[in-house]
């Protein structure tokens, strides 16, 4: 069963000038997302800088996301689930965090494949089986070999798809052949979400139900509409939206995520702050290119 259909936005974690979590700006970001049509809030993912959050901060941010998303959902008469990042390369820690975030009210967990120490395909099966047995809420598997240096194979996904609360995959391998094989093997047991903002329509064409997006931080309505137009049969309009956003996507991934998307939010006066080290800020050249594309896309006024 799908946690959501449409656009799930991996929301940036805003920091103030002292480098602390900025509650007020986070509320503004979530309100903007729910108002503009986003179908799920993803808290403390890669874009949310989960790797540089302390355990207490991670839990606090997810709790805050749950509480404020509920308020925004009531305000705009829309039910928007919260999916909490709970992945890592230590299974025991993932289990503990998953249990705490479930108790904090998350509607689902997103668990990236282990990185650095990595594992074998058999290890992936045992890793996800252990996490799934320890929590009662749905789990989205996140496959992003460009960051983890570990690729989940279709046969491995098929094995873990037999576990009832492993329900979806955020697939960011960029390998459309692999995606097709996953869909062939898993069928309706796994909901496929694009993990790449330039592959949303290709994923939908293979039966995907949406995207978990970074770009949606600044273009929530466009990403939501792209998915819904496709699912409603208006494939030409969906493709137009996909192709139209590609120049912006290229800028947003020309440096390490979430550095460019935070720069974009700051240009839109959301006051998202800087990233935590070791991430820094984009250079002046990329900042200017990003600004130009945002102007072209209508996100910033022309001067």
Image: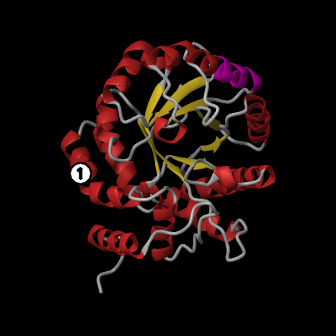
Mark 1, residues whose alpha carbon is within 10 Å: few (<14), some, or many (≥20)? few
**Residue at (55% x, 12% y) in the render:** 159
For label 1, the SS is helix
Residue 50 is situated, as x and y percent measured from the top left of the image, at: 65, 50
Decide if residue 20 is on the left or right side of residue 221.
Answer: right
Decide if residue 60 is on the left or right side of residue 189.
Answer: right
Residue 204 is situated, as x and y percent measured from the top left of the image, at: 33, 34
Residue 294, above or below 83: below
**Residue at (71% x, 25% y) in the render:** 131
Q: Quadrant of residue 181?
A: top left
Residue 295 is situated, as x and y percent measured from the top left of the image, at: 31, 74
From the image, tell me which residue sits under label 1: 243
Residue 127 covered by magenta stretch: yes
Q: How many marks?
A: 1
Residue 80 is situated, as x and y percent measured from the top left of the image, at: 57, 47
Quadrant (top left/top right/bottom left/bottom right) for the C terminus? bottom left
Residue 191, above or below 34: above
Please state which of residues 26 and 81 is positioned toward the viewer in this rendering: 26
Q: Quadrant of residue 111?
A: top right
Decide if residue 8 is on the left or right side of residue 84.
Answer: left
**Residue at (47% x, 14% y) in the render:** 155
Please state which of residues 258 and 39 is positioned toward the viewer in this rendering: 258
Residue 254, above or below 88: below
Please state which of residues 35 and 168 is positioned toward the viewer in this rendering: 168
Kindly give the residue lying farthest to the front in the view shown: 117
**Residue at (73% x, 51% y) in the render:** 58
Residue 68, above or below 228: below
Instruction: Tell me which segment is drawn in magenta.
Output: 126-134
Residue 98 covered by magenta stretch: no
Q: What's the magenta bit mostly, secondary-structure-wise?
A: helix
């Amino acid at each position: 069963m799908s946690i959501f259909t449409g656009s799930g936005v991996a929301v940036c974690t805003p920091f103030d000038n002292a480098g602390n979590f900025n509650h007020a700006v986070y509320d503004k970001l979530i309100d903007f997302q729910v108002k503009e049509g986003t179908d799920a809030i993803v808290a403390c993912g890669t874009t949310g800088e989960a790797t540089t959050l302390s355990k207490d901060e991670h839990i606090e941010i997810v709790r805050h996301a749950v509480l404020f998303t509920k308020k925004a959902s009531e305000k705009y008469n829309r039910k928007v689930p919260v999916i909490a990042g709970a992945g890592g390369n230590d299974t025991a820690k993932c289990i503990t965090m998953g249990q705490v975030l479930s108790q904090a009210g998350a509607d689902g967990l997103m668990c990236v494949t282990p990185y650095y120490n990595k594992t074998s395909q058999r290890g992936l099966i045992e890793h996800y089986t252990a996490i799934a047995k320890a929590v009662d809420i749905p789990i989205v598997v996140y496959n992003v070999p460009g960051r983890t240096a570990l690729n989940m194979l279709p046969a491995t996904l098929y094995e873990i798809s037999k576990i009832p609360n492993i329900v979806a995959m955020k697939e960011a391998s960029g390998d459309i052949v692999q995606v097709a094989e996953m869909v062939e093997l898993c069928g309706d047991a796994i909901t496929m979400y694009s993990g790449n903002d330039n592959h949303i329509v290709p994923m939908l064409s293979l039966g995907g139900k949406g995207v978990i997006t970074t770009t949606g931080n600044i273009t929530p309505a466009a990403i939501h509409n792209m998915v819904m137009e496709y699912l409603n049969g208006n494939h030409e309009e969906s493709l137009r939206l996909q192709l139209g956003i590609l120049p912006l996507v290229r800028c947003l991934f020309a440096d390490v995520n979430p550095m460019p998307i935070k720069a974009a939010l700051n240009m839109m006066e959301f006051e998202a702050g800087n990233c935590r080290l070791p991430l820094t800020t984009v250079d002046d050249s990329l900042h200017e290119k990003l600004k130009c594309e945002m102007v072209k896309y209508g996100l910033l006024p022309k001067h």
